Amino acid sequence: MRIRLHLIPTASPSPSQRRIDMRESEVPTESASPVSAYNEWDPLEEVIVGIVDHAHFPPWHVAVGAPLSPEQRAVFQERAGQPFPADQIAAARDELDQLVDVLEGEGVTVRRPEPQDHGRSYGAPGWSSAGLYDAMPRDVLLVVGEEVIEAPMAWRSRYHAASAYRPLLKEYFRQGARWSSPPKPDLPDELYVADWTDQPEGEPFRSVITEFEPTFDAADFIRCGRDIFAQRSHVTNRLGIEWVRRHLGAEYQVHELELADDHPMHIDASLMPLAEGKLLIHPDRVPEVPKIFKDWEVRTAPKPVIPDGHPLYMTSKWINMNVLMIDEERMIVEAQDEPMRRLAESWGMAAIPCPFRNFNSFGGSFHCATADIRRRGGLRSHF
């Protein structure tokens, strides 16, 4: 399967916009807003780190099963509505606290969400559900420049996922940040393909969600300044990508990537820009690098070293790609991931180790577990 890059057209700029000197527009500027992040590698100044308290397996639903392996689906069906094992929650909580210590030791301000009771039931006309967790702020909050956008998530178990972050969002808003939310989805049965099954190998991707209404997870978007890359997945539809495109306007170009992933959900374990001119890719999901990266150095992620017996409820071992850049020269890597450490060092980066394998079981790693609120730098083109 070959990767296809869809350049989604943007509205034509006004005459005044066309007169902008691009050299001036690419000069980084200081911002008075507490929120300001344009890419994945400018110096990190403030970040939200998730929590695993009260994490639950969500009620079973076809949309939950679509991104998972058959073995993972069986676990989710068996444990639907139950808390995650207490010992695993405790171990993951300890690793998150260690991540906070690492980040603060590197001079980064760390904020945390408010714990929510994910065992409580809620609903909307036609359906009811309970929650999941507050572990992955990257899934929930899309930070573009001085704006935080709440994701309209497709899983019913994440319908209120932003609630844990609302105290922080209100604080940022009062201090001058922009805070937006797309239309709240209804998540009716019409959004889902009720008889969805894994498609045979080689067939075009068939998502478990339809185009009934816009939905997306923020982690299906990755930022490179004026260029933002998105993938359609089992949680993000084309209407969701189109909403982001129209909302952001002519300052940004949204590129829709179609990756060779049989169970796509979140782009940051397939394609990760680590610094300007440096791109890390999955060896199979990106068989052909998009032409826009022609001047970048592209490297394939090293083979994961997570043991076969380690529980991974919602992800593959390639979560090893899900690293966090403090800046272009500092990368946080899982403490036992020696191949990723060597890759960072071969690229001239300092690899900062942090234990995170127990957190990996919950479906993410350092990039997923964080949402960078402020990085020092301004809006510019990197291509």
Image (cartoon, grey):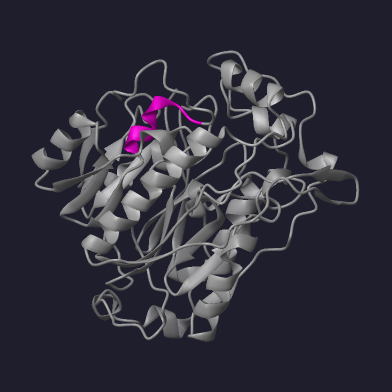
Q: Is residue 164 magenta?
A: no
Along the viewing direction, whichever of 310 and 341 lies nearer the viewer? 310
Vertical position of residue 50 compared to residue 201: above or below: below
Indicate the quadrant containing the C terminus: top left, top right, bottom left or bottom right.
Answer: bottom left
Indicate the quadrant containing the N terminus: top left, top right, bottom left or bottom right.
Answer: top left
The picture places residue 304, in percent across and down from the top left corner, at: 30, 25
Q: How many marks?
A: 0
Q: Residue at 80% of width from left, 28% of height from top?
A: 194
The picture places residue 231, in percent across and down from the top left corner, at: 51, 43
Along the viewing direction, whichever of 4 and 145 lies nearer the viewer? 145
The picture places residue 332, in percent across and down from the top left corner, at: 25, 47
Quadrant of res 237 = top right
Q: Residue at 66% of width from left, 27% of height from top?
A: 65
Vertical position of residue 250 compared to residue 202: above or below: below
Quadrant of res 245 = bottom right
Magenta stretch: give its range.
315-321
The picture places residue 179, in percent across and down from the top left corner, at: 57, 74
Would residue 382 be visible to someone looking at this image? no
What secondary structure characterizes most of the magenta part? helix
Residue extending farthest to the top is: 200
Q: Is residue 316 magenta?
A: yes
Vertical position of residue 78 compared to residue 133: above or below: above
Residue extending farthest to the right is: 126
Along the viewing direction, whichever of 128 and 240 lies nearer the viewer? 128
Q: Residue at 64% of width from left, 37% of height from top?
A: 83
Along the viewing direction, whichever of 74 and 295 lies nearer the viewer? 74
Would residue 232 be visible to someone looking at this image? yes
Vertical position of residue 254 compared to residue 269: above or below: below
